[in-house]
Amino acid sequence: MRAVALRVTRSDRLAEEVVQDSLMAVWRNPGRFDPNRGPLGPWLMTITRNNAIDGLRRAAVIQRHTEQVDLELRPATDDVHDEVWLAVRRDRLYEAIMRLGSDQRRALELAFISGLTHIEVAEHEGIPLGTAKGRIRLALLKLREHLAPSIGPDPSDVGRSDAASRAHLQRQERQLERDYEQRPEGRSEASRSEP
């Protein structure tokens, strides 16, 4: 039935509606089928084909009316819940990014939005490679901390309390800052660019 509807309508959405309408018509009035006039299969295909043609005519009328009104028809999303949850998650991510320091936010945007490598981020910002990596890493850790309540715990934090997770993140941040402060100043440019 779907193949017939799809062949006539050339639209997945409309073909699904046609099949649904055809089955509902048979369900509402099963007495219309007369086994003396032929088998069930061809009868169902005829109903489907006729409904598909009617569906195309309805769609053409709707299209003509919407062209006059200048409306754009978009297929509705199947799951409004997913659409809303995506918007909520997008807002939370934006808020978390806005909480970052400007250096971390800029490094994160260059790496993940602009698609630059760590080396390109360092060159763009005019900073050493280790600093660029540290800013990106620290930004990711802070994002994880800000977003953890809304997206769930980090798998490595399973079994830790919220306070233990925060303490773990703070230790990681302090370690990154110490590593940055203790880096040798006299390293050559070649040794700085090693990952």
Image (spheres, rainbow, N blue to C red):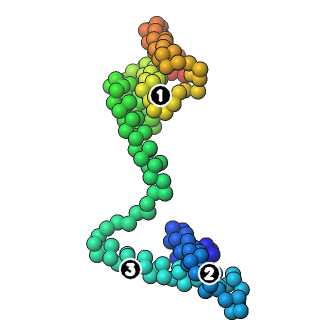
Q: Going 67% across and 84% down the picture, which residue do you hit?
A: 42
Q: Which residue is mark 3?
A: 61
Q: Report how far apart the C-alphas of labels 1 and 3 lie in the structure.
A: 50 Å
Q: Going 38% across and 80% down the picture, which residue do you hit?
A: 61
N-term-proximal mark, 1 vs 2? 2
In front: 44, or 3? 44
Q: Give the vertical position of 46 relative to 24 (above or below).
A: below
Q: Nearer the viewer, mark 1 or mark 2?
A: 2
Which label belongs to residue 30?
2
Q: Secondary structure at mark 1?
A: helix
Rendering coords of residue 184 (x, y %): 47, 8
Q: Report how far apart the C-alphas of labels 3 and 2 lie in the structure.
A: 30 Å
Q: Going 32% across and 76% down the picture, which residue do you hit?
A: 65
Q: Is residue 99 left or right of 28 when viewed as pictured?
A: left
**Figure quadrant of residue 29:** bottom right
Q: Secondary structure at mark 3?
A: helix
Q: Report how far apart the C-alphas of labels 1 and 2 lie in the structure.
A: 55 Å
Q: Which residue is mark 1?
A: 148
N-term-proximal mark, 1 vs 3? 3
* Disc 1 packing (10 Å; few <14; some 14–19; many ≥20): some
